[in-house]
Amino acid sequence: MNKASGYGQYCPLSVATDILCKRWTMLILRELVFGYTSFNDISRGVPRMSRTLLSSRLKELTNSGIIKKETSSSQNHTNYTLTPAGEALRKVVFGMADWAQEWLRVEPSLENLDSDHLMWNIRHKAIPHPSLPEPFIVHFFLRDQTKNRQNSWLIFEAGAVDLCIIDRDFDVDVQIDAAATTLAKVFLGWSDFDEEIRTGALKVFGDEKYTKILPEWLGKSRLATITKQPEEWLVSPS
């Protein structure tokens, strides 16, 4: 750590802040906690972060002893994993997220929504289901996004779920049509799925045998079960 950047305090919190509170660092740790280990997968979890800056932050976290970098013998593949000290930050990452879910006002946080990140998170929480055929293709149409970000596909196959943003002339089983903001609110438990369908804000098309079990395979954020505090107590992101 550069001594000139410190807070001049003996408090361990000030030292931890120097390491963890740089821009993007906690979000990189979130991706590592979720189990993503390759540079490309971590990058997909922080799509607005430049790859150069990501490389720099990963190097800093490695030098701090929070993550370790492992390169295959062929030198063609590198993984980043949490050290024991990094694993101990899992409760910090989840604790900050839980606080935000409980105490943060909803609408301001949607003003700068990144739909790529939303779809990456939806892919992360999607659940292979024994009642689904293989492959099972779900087309998402995000009506409030620009043309190059409106379409994406989840592919359920061989016990895994992949995300595709290129139209490969898929044979779609279910289509979900909604604004990205609506989808985000449902995913995070900020609004009710059935109510959004009733109002037409969210539309689902496909065979009923698949759509009626949609909550069982689409999944929701881990945070969706956390109840918001009363409106007058909530805080707004700056």
Image (spheres, helix red, strand yellow):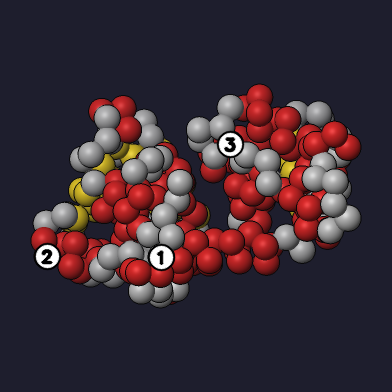
Image side of residue 91 versus residue 19, left or right: left
Callout 3 amino acid: Ser
**Residue type at the position of mark 1:** Leu
Q: Is residue 108 visible?
A: yes
Q: Which mark is residue 27?
A: none
Give me the disc on residue 43: 3
Tell which residue pokes out farthest to the top in this image.
Answer: 52
Q: Nearer the viewer, residue 115 or 176?
A: 115
Distance in Å between CA atoms under marks 2 and 3? 36 Å
Q: Residue 42 location, x and y as percent?
A: 61, 41
Q: Quadrant of residue 142?
A: top left
CB atoms at circles 1 and 2 under 8 Å apart? no
Rendering coords of residue 37 (x, y %): 68, 45
Q: Kindly report the distance in space between the C-alpha atoms of the residues bearing marks 1 and 2.
A: 28 Å
Which amino acid, mark 2? Arg
The x, y position of residue 235, in whole percent, is 43, 60
| Residue 4 vertical placement versus 203 (above, below) | above
Query: Which residue lies under the disc numbered 2?
Result: 198
Task: Determine the residue positioned at 18% across, 67% down.
Answer: 195
Q: Earlier in the sequence, mark 1 or mark 2?
A: 2
Q: Residue at x 74, y 37 (%)?
A: 58
At a point 19% along the width and 55% down the height, the residue shown is: 202
Helix, strand or loop at label 3? It is helix
Q: Which residue is mark 1?
A: 234
Percent of width and height locating residue 27 = 60, 47
Report the front residue among 1 and 204: 1
